[in-house]
Amino acid sequence: MSTLSEKMRLIREVESKSREEFGKEIGVPKRTIEGIENEGRVPRGDVVEKVAARWPRYAFWLITGNTDLPFHMSPDRSTGTVLRVFENVSNLHPGSDDLMTRPEWFGKVQFIQRSDEKNDLYALIETIQPELMGIKQCIFIGSGMNLCSDGSGKNRLKDLASYLIQKGRADLIKTSELKICLPGDINTLFETKQIEESALQVPDLGKAEWLKKLYTNFTAWKMEGESYEPKFTWQDLK
């Protein structure tokens, strides 16, 4: 883990401040900043407090080395991206006008399948809004879809395909992705309306036979869209 002196230097560099400017921002002499960075001196508590007060988004990371996005972040831009829900619907069906987001702003459809429950399927539609501070804005489709169902779950998937086609975004059907997610991360998504992008994993089709069949159904949806018929039902996945 980085030392406090290394963390302070990273904050200064990310904020594009010279040592003199950084010192003025927090009310300490330039030579104090030089001593921290050049000699690795441990910054006094009051200096750390001033940095945290000036850039509160880094305060949690500065003290603990951890993040809690979107509010508590690291200045290291190589850290992971968060998918944040700003519109939430239970179903998108033909003729629906439930979203504020224009269809031309839709960027990518990602389905989320719980790793331990073949019946739970959700979807995120990422928008093309530029990523800001490690956050991507998404639309969450939260219930009713099921790749293994031959009833209402299938019909919800067909509704989604019809909706995208009617909105002129049939391209998103063929470019959609299926991801596997742990139950704890799904719960975090429901509780906080956000999820780390790294929590969405490409399914390892060699890990379980049910995953292969599930992916076959997903491929059928991508190919058939509003005419989707599952190749396997939930009984086949036992």
Image (cartoon, helix red, strand yellow):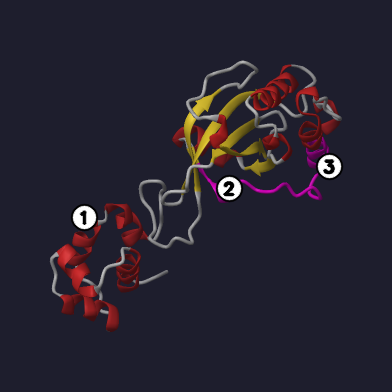
SS at circle 2: helix
Q: Amino acid at mark 1?
A: Ala
Alpha-carbon span between mark 3 and mark 1: 53 Å
Q: Quick check: 83 above or below 7?
A: above
SS at circle 3: helix
Q: Identify the disc placed on residue 53.
A: 1
SS at circle 1: helix
Q: Amino acid at mark 3?
A: Glu
Report the quarter where the N terminus lies.
bottom left
The percent position of residue 93, horizontal first and vertical second, equals: 64, 19
Q: Which residue is mark 3?
A: 209
- Could you tell whether 140 is left or right of 36 in the image? right
Residue at figure coordinates x 15%, y 67% from the top left? 24
Q: Which residue is mark 2?
A: 199
**Residue 1 is one of the magenta-drawn residues:** no
Q: Can you tell which quarter of the image residue 233 is in?
A: top right
Q: Amino acid at mark 2?
A: Ala
Q: Can you tell which quarter of the image residue 114 is in?
A: top right
Residue at figure coordinates x 48%, y 42% from the top left? 129
Q: Within 10 angstroms of label 3, few (less than 14), some, or many (20 or more) residues?
A: few
- Could you tell whether 22 is left or right of 88 in the image? left
Q: Within 10 angstroms of label 1, few (less than 14), some, or many (20 or more) residues?
A: few
Q: Of the residues tagged 2 and 3, which is closer to the observer?
A: 2
Q: Quick check: 57 above or below 235?
A: below
Q: Disc 3 or 1, which lies upstream in sequence?
A: 1
The percent position of residue 2, horizontal first and vertical second, equals: 39, 70
- Could you tell whether 73 is left or right of 95 in the image? left
Residues shaded magenta = 195-216
Q: Quick check: 220 above or below 22?
A: above
For this rendering, which residue is in front, 135 or 180? 135
Report the quarter where the C terminus lies.
top right
Q: Quick check: 23 above or below 172?
A: below
